[in-house]
Structure formats: structure tokens, C-alpha cells
Image: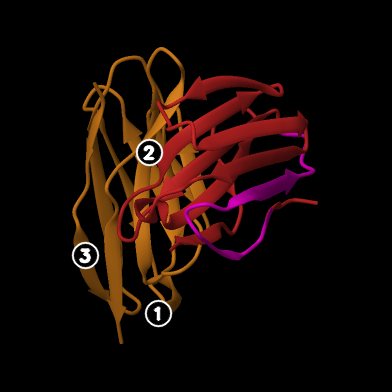
Amino acid sequence: GQSLEQPSEVTAVEGAIVQINCTYQTSGFYGLSWYQQHDGGAPTFLSYNALDGLEETGRFSSFLSRSDSYGYLLLQELQMKDSASYFCAVRAGLFNKFYFGSGTKLNVKP
Amino acid sequence: DTEVTQTPKHLVMGMTNKKSLKCEQHMGHRAMYWYKQKAKKPPELMFVYSYEKLSINESVPSRFSPECPNSSLLNLHLHALQPEDSALYLCASSPSGSGKFFGPGTRLTVL
């Protein structure tokens, strides 16, 4: 089976840096992706890592270590609008499916 | 056009009604998906279409019936739903499986 773990909630202040971790247990791993979802909205694709290392896109970076079955999303210079839920998702398995983590609610405070 | 559109945005239906949800994308993506999402939960995969053919059905009840008329359109036909089917229904498309682009969703309420 597939399982993913990420913290349920994280709180940080505006301007700070926050890291949201995701550990996974899968068979047939292809890659790890991250999505942002504001309350009442739809998920928005943020990043995808298929290979080890750090991918940077503006204030957001995503990291993957395949040997440790671990990844993280790094958000820098936090803004109030970054308050949202963040889901990690692994692409894995025989049918190349995506499996979502349970989500991390990020609260950004002034 | 770089977005996925869904109609309607909101839908209220009775348990005996028949309705359809529609999804459209013009990004040339060959994989399209239906997800169901309950409040404060991650999206749950329902169906996957690859090159207009149904490739994955996640044991979804037959009261949900997907259809892919062409490479840009995806429908979800609803019939005899239950109140517990009330949720946000999300359509997504993907160019190669590296990441998914979600539509805004249809918020469904079954009375």
C-alpha cells in the first residue's frame, strides 16, 4: 500500500521561513508533488520532484530525497496570503497513480 | 488557454434527480481526472481517462458515470445520489503525470 505523513498544522509569522515535511512509504515511486489549497478553493499545483535535490520557484522550493522517502516544501518570506492547506502527493504504483497526504494547514500570523 | 473550467460551480439536487458535471481543458493534456473532496480532507481519486479511454475506476458506485466525449471534455453523470455524496467534485488534467492542473470544482449538495 501507499502511505504519506505530513504535519496537520503549522503556524508561522509573516516574513518568516517555514518548512512542511512529507514522508512516504510507497511501492514503485515516480515523484513527489505539492499543492496549495485555500479554503473554498481548488488545489493549485506548486511543484514536482522526480529526482533528488532542491527545485526553486520564486519564494517556494521543494526538496526530495528518494533514499530517505522524504521531501519538504519550503516557503520563504511568508505572506498572509500563504495561509492555506498544503498537500504532498506521490506518483507511484503499478498504475502510476497519485496518492495525496492528509494536508498541512499553514497559519500565517502578522 | 491554460486553465481547466468546470460547470456548474454549485449544484443542489434531490436523490431522484439526474444531473451532469462538465469539465473542459484546451491545454492538450491527454490525461483527465475526476476527484471527490470532503471538507478538511485530501482529494480522493474517482476516475482517470488517458487518451479518452477510462484507465482507472477507483471502485466508484455506479450512480457516478464518467464520460469523455473528446480530448478536451470530461463529464460526470450523476443519478440517484445519496446525501453522503455531497462534496466538492474536482476535475484535473495532466500533460505527462508530473503534476495536475485542477479546475475550480463543483460544490454538490444532495438533499
Q: Which residue is mark 2?
A: A89
Residue B17 or residue B26, whichever sits in front: B17
Tell me the kind of residue under disc 2: Ala
Q: Whole-percent x and y of residue B43?
A: 40, 46
Q: Nearer the viewer, mark 2 or mark 1?
A: 2
In the image, is residue A85 part of the stretch drawn in magenta? no
Q: Give me the residue at 51% from left, 62% from top.
A: B107
Tag 1 subunit: A
The chain letter of the orange chain reads: A
Report whether B30 appears left or right of B13. right
| Residue A10 - label | 3
- The residue at the point 67 percent across, 41 percent down is B75
**Residue B59 picture quarter:** top left
Secondary element at image label 2: strand
In front: A28, or A72? Answer: A28
Secondary structure at numbered mark 1: helix
| Magenta segment boundaries in residue numbering | B6-29
Marks 1/3 same chain: yes
Q: Which mark is residue A80?
A: 1
The answer to which image quadrant residue A12 occupies is bottom left
Q: Is residue A90 left or right of residue B77?
A: left
Residue type (three-letter) at the residue carrying disc 3? Val
Residue A2 placement (x, y as % from top left): 26, 26
- Asked if marks 2 and 3 fall on the same chain, the answer is yes
